[in-house]
Image: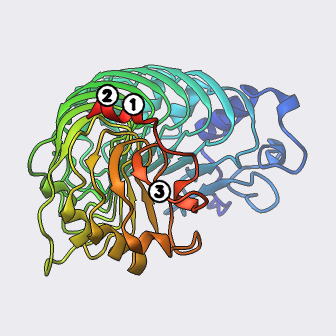
Amino acid sequence: MPNFALPKTLDSDIEALRSLKNGIDPYSIPPTTFLDTWDFSVDPCENTGSHFVGILCDIPSGNTSQRIVALDLNSMGYDGFLSPSIGSLTELTFLDLSKNRFRGPLPESFTRLTKITTLSLSENIFTGYIPSEITNLRWLQYLDLSKNNFIGTLPPTFVDLRQLTHVDVSYNLFFSNLPDLDALWQLTSLALDHNHFEGGLPRLPSNLRTLSLNNNLLSGRLPPTMRLPHLEALDLSNNQFTGTIGWGLLLLPSIRRINLSFNLFTSIEVFNATNMTTTLEELDASHNRIQMHLPLGLATIESMLSIHLEGNSFVGRIPPEYGARAMNSWRQLFLNDNYLEGSVPSEFKNLQREKLNGSLASNCLVCRNGHYLCEGRQRPSSECHRHG
């Protein structure tokens, strides 16, 4: 007589789930959380309602066993180690273990998850290296390893993951030079910040929309032209870049926010942007080594709303064009801790804090006492003369 029993979960998938739960401190599993619902007296794929919350199974064809295709642990601080049996879940396409306390290295079997498209391990305590065999995950699109303790380099084979659209490995302990990444042509979001990467800026994917490389040890000059037509947000702050901030960077066709603060730049190249289409709204070049007059061209970038140039060595007078833009469209202007001199443009004297947030303190200006932009006093005349 034919057997019409519904197919059940593949035994190896059940054992993988059992091992995963056994690797977690039971005292870190609060009542009613996802893992608390895992009751192995019933079949996982047959009981994904009130039991085995966080698991999705496929729809089997014929009388084959069901497989687990998605696994989501609900960010509850589960404390333990990731079992090597995770590699048995070979039909997984989605795995989210973020915001828990998984520790230790990734098991080698991890690279057997060859169908996975979304992998989030962020905000755990994982350690060790990223294996070069990560390229086995050739369908991977979304990768988030941020806020762990991974070390080593990004393996050269990393660029073979051509399906990637989102990568975040920020807040780890990665080091060494970055490989060229332009082969990852579908990548739109890249966060490598808060690591120990060294060397120059690598070649980058042309489809990037956000790029975060801040808080590393990157150095050298930025290329005069960057083919990043879709880039909207760039953060290279807290590195060791030198040379000139180029005009081409400020005129990228989609750029809105640029943060280059806390580097070693010595100049900004800005021309007249009148009648040009611009998108740049926020520029932060504070705390560098820029020693020049304030660039008039910044006042001609029609889209500009916020400028941070504090903590440099700008000299000379504040252009009246800055006063006009401050009255009309600028929302933030920080010029403090420079060596600007002379009288403040008349437009500044009528500004209110609600109109423009900023500071002119710690310069060599003739600045009216009591005005909010002048709070914090000016430099002593001896310091101004010595610098001049």
Q: Residues within 10 Å of mark 1 (few under 14, many from 20)?
A: few
For marks 2 and 3 on the same chain, the one whose residue lies earlier in the sequence: 3
Camera-side residue of 305 and 327 = 327
Camera-side residue of 214 and 189 = 214
Instruction: Please say if 103 is above or below 259.
Output: above
Q: Quadrant of residue 241?
A: top left
- Reading the image, the residue beneath label 3 is 367
Identified by mark 3, the residue type is: Cys
19 left or right, relative to 253: right
- Reading the image, the residue beneath label 2 is 386
- Reading the image, the residue beneath label 1 is 383
For image coordinates 14% across by 77% down, the residue present is 276
30 left or right, relative to 176: right
Q: Residue furthest right?
A: 31
Q: Secondary structure at mark 1?
A: helix
Q: Position of residue 268 (x, y in %)?
A: 19, 48
Q: Position of residue 110 (x, y in %)?
A: 47, 30
Q: Position of residue 43 (x, y in %)?
A: 74, 49
Pointer 2 and pointer 1: residues touching (CB < 8 Å)?
Answer: yes
Quadrant where the image shows the C terminus: top left
Camera-side residue of 181 and 305 = 305
For image coordinates 54% across by 63% down, the residue present is 59
Identified by mark 2, the residue type is: Arg
Pointer 2 and pointer 3: residues touching (CB < 8 Å)?
Answer: no
